[in-house]
Image (cartoon, rainbow, N blue to C red):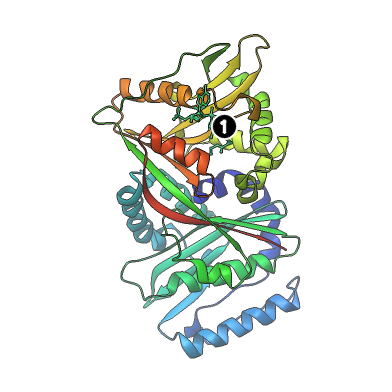
């Protein structure tokens, strides 16, 4: 439920450093210099050939805009573009993206972020980056300036997905581009064999305050999220998502280690959303004292909350426990004068979608998640 850019940053850095030498073998030079450079050492032949074909393709078909390796650029060149992107995150999702933008800019200056830029008349008008997480690649983000030519985003994504699919040891690629409307990025991913999962960005205005009546809890209690909840929480996530569509989209849900990584990323790392302990709860079984469910909420703007996780063990569903956690979360946000609560949910997860609709959430946007396995 965390935006891809955020997830990518939080989860991929160690692996990113690990893989960087492999990627560093291939670099594109600006076309004005009249060459595409292949250092050769360590570059698989297939990758080199592909890059050559791309370069020729660009020279012939797309003269005005060049696609260049992201690591040729730093924060100064990308800042105007990222500020334009931050404005859009605010408009489309009530999300304060500035801290994430600053984080990306820092990474750009460190030259450790693999990806591509689109350059027109010496100005960066688009970018896309990715990270490596073990044998998985995560497309972190793609954004193009409003004034740039149509189809530029697709070109950037073509480069990113092709690079990832040709990276040795990469067997899975995940992408969730929240900022882009469903359908708008399909061609780049569909042509490369990705599966598509439409997802909803839902929102609940908190002014006037919504009326949510919490059910009376019998045999359970709600408790604020605490440090000792990581391990039991990871267990709940893995069991809650067994055979679930969301574990096809995010493979972290399939193991305890992955679920722990997910929780760590949500709770411990700041960025595009800061974990908000006051509105995050676990459900505890009164007799066994076991954690059977959780709702985690982050702050994505001073006055906007975002539910990053809600799940219950299968045997404790349909007793109103999710509604009870949501009511407690809302109470906490309302007490602190928040104005909105949002979340993302996979369209095919109809139980959850219907629950959110009954709670008063409405769909503000539809975007796509993509997964490739090779
Ligand atoms: C989605 C999920 C969190 C819902 O949890 P839940 O505790 O079953 O939800 P609730 O019981 O609060 O509400 C679900 C519905 O169950 C039914 N229900 C609630 N109490 C009930 C009872 N005593 N008897 C029968 N049905 C009941 C109602 O239809 C209720 O909706 P309503 O209260 O709005 O009318 C849970 O199904 C889950 O963990 N799914 C897997 C993970 C997931 O999909 N998470 C969401 C990702 S976005």
**Location of mark 1 (residue):** 311
Residue 58 in percent (x, y) is at 51, 84
Q: Quadrant of the rendered structure where residue 294 is?
A: top right
Taking the spot 35% from the left edge, 35% from the top edge, the residue there is 360
Taking the spot 67% from the left edge, 47% from the top edge, the residue there is 251
Residue projecting furthest to the left: 208
Q: Quarter holding the C terminus?
A: bottom right
Q: Is disc 1 placed on a helix, strand or loop?
A: strand
Q: Nearer the viewer, residue 224 or 38?
A: 224
> Counting other residues with Cα less than 10 Å from the Cα at mark 1, is it few (<14), some (14-19), or many (20 or more)?
many
Taking the spot 43% from the left edge, 36% from the top edge, the residue there is 356
Residue projecting furthest to the bottom: 60
Residue 40 in percent (x, y) is at 72, 77
Residue 69 in percent (x, y) is at 54, 69
Judge: label 1 CB < 8 Å from ligand 1: yes
- Depicted 255 relative to depicted 227: above or below: below
Residue 126 in percent (x, y) is at 42, 67
- Depicted 86 relative to depicted 281: above or below: below
- Depicted 138 relative to depicted 30: above or below: above
- Answer yes or no: is residue 63 visible: yes
- Answer yes or no: is residue 277 visible: no
Taking the spot 53% from the left edge, 60% from the top edge, the residue there is 129
Judge from the rendering whether residue 84 lies leftward or rightward of residue 194; answer left or right. left
């Amino acid at each position: 439920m965390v935006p891809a850019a955020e997830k990518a940053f939080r989860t991929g850095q160690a692996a990113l450093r690990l893989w960087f030498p492999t990627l560093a073998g291939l670099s594109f030079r600006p076309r004005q210099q009249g060459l595409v450079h292949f250092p050769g050492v360590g570059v698989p032949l297939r990758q080199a050939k592909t890059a050559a074909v791309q370069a020729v393709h660009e020279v012939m078909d797309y003269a005005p805009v060049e696609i260049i390796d992201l690591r040729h650029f730093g924060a100064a060149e990308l800042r105007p573009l990222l500020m334009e992107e931050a404005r859009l995150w605010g408009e489309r999702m009530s999300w304060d993206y500035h801290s994430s933008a600053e984080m990306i800019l820092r990474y750009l200056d460190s030259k450790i972020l693999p990806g591509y830029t689109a350059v027109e008349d010496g100005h960066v008008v688009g970018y896309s980056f990715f990270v490596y997480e073990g044998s998985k690649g995560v497309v972190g983000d793609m954004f193009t300036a409003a004034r740039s030519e149509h189809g530029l985003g697709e070109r950037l994504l073509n480069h990113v997905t092709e690079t990832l699919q040709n990276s040795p040891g990469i067997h899975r690629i995940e992408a969730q581009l929240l900022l882009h409307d469903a359908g708008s990025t399909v061609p780049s991913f569909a042509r490369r064999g990705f599966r598509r999962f439409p997802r909803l960005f839902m929102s609940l205005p908190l002014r006037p305050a919504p009326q949510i009546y919490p059910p009376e809890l019998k045999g359970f209690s709600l408790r604020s999220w605490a440090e000792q909840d990581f391990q039991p929480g990871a267990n709940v996530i893995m069991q809650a998502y067994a055979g679930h569509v969301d574990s096809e989209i995010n493979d972290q849900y399939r193991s305890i280690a992955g679920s722990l990584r997910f929780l760590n990323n949500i709770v411990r790392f700041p960025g595009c959303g800061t974990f908000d302990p006051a509105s995050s709860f676990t459900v505890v079984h009164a007799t066994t004292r076991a954690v059977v469910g959780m709702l985690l909420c982050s702050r994505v703007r001073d006055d906007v909350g975002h539910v990053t996780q809600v799940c219950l063990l299968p045997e404790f569903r349909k007793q109103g426990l999710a509604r009870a956690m949501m009511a407690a979360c809302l109470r906490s946000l309302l007490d602190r004068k928040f104005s909105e609560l949002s979340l993302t949910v996979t369209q095919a997860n109809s139980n959850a979608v219907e629950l959110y609709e009954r709670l008063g959430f409405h769909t503000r946007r539809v975007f796509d998640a993509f997964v490739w396995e090779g």
